[in-house]
Image (tube, rainbow, N blue to C red):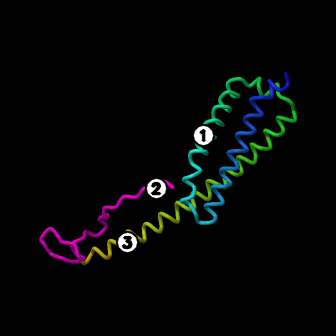
Amino acid sequence: MDQDKNGLIERLISITAALIEVMNRELEFLNNMQPEEIRDLQAEKQDLAKAYEGYMLEIKSNPALLAQCEDSVKHRLEKVTAMFNSTLSENERALRAVKSVSERLLGVIVNAVAEKQAGAAYSSTGAMGASALAAGKPLPFAVNQSL
């Protein structure tokens, strides 16, 4: 009987720990400047996140599940939840940092391309040179922002 009332909470603890492990691997790739390696983790991370969300919704819809589980299981859930929140914050900071660096790098590239093309552009009157590009007019450029 104790196993039944603890079962869902135990599965939530297990899923949360697995999600922490995936996010830690993701952080390791980010810290080692290997963001391309993160792609391999995305399917696993999405599956775990969906499972986590499902368990959380089930517990929210039936609070008695948590109220009836053993204190030791509650304590483990609190501990893994704190670790999850900490890892989630660290993961978010690292992803934002990589995004910021990538955006700055893309800005440098766009500016370099614009400068290079400035001498070869034509104006509406057929003039060639830097005056052909309107000041402040954006250079057509698209970027895929996914990691």
Q: What is the C-alpha distance between the residues marked 2 and 3? A: 18 Å
**Start-end of magenta stretch:** 120-147
- Mark nearest the camera among 2 and 3 is 2
Q: Farthest residue toward the front? A: 40
Residue 2 marker: none
The residue labelled by disc 2 is 145
Circle 2 residues within 10 Å: few <14, some 14–19, many ≥20: few
SS for callout 1: helix
* Closer to viewer: mark 2 or mark 1: 1
Reading the image, the residue beneath label 3 is: 111
User: Which mark lies nearer to you, 3 or 1?
Assistant: 1
Residue sitting at x 76%, y 25%: 65
Using the rendered view, name the quadrant where residue 143 is placed.
bottom left
Identify the mark at residue 47; answer none if there is no mark: 1
Residue contact between numbered discs 2 and 1, judged by CB atoms under 8 Å = no
For badge 2, the amino acid type reads: Gln
Marks 2 and 1, the one that precedes in the sequence: 1
139 relative position to 126: left or right: right
Q: Is residue 125 above or below residue 72?
A: below
Q: Residues within 10 Å of mark 1 (few under 14, many from 20)?
A: few
C-alpha distance separating marks 3 and 1: 40 Å
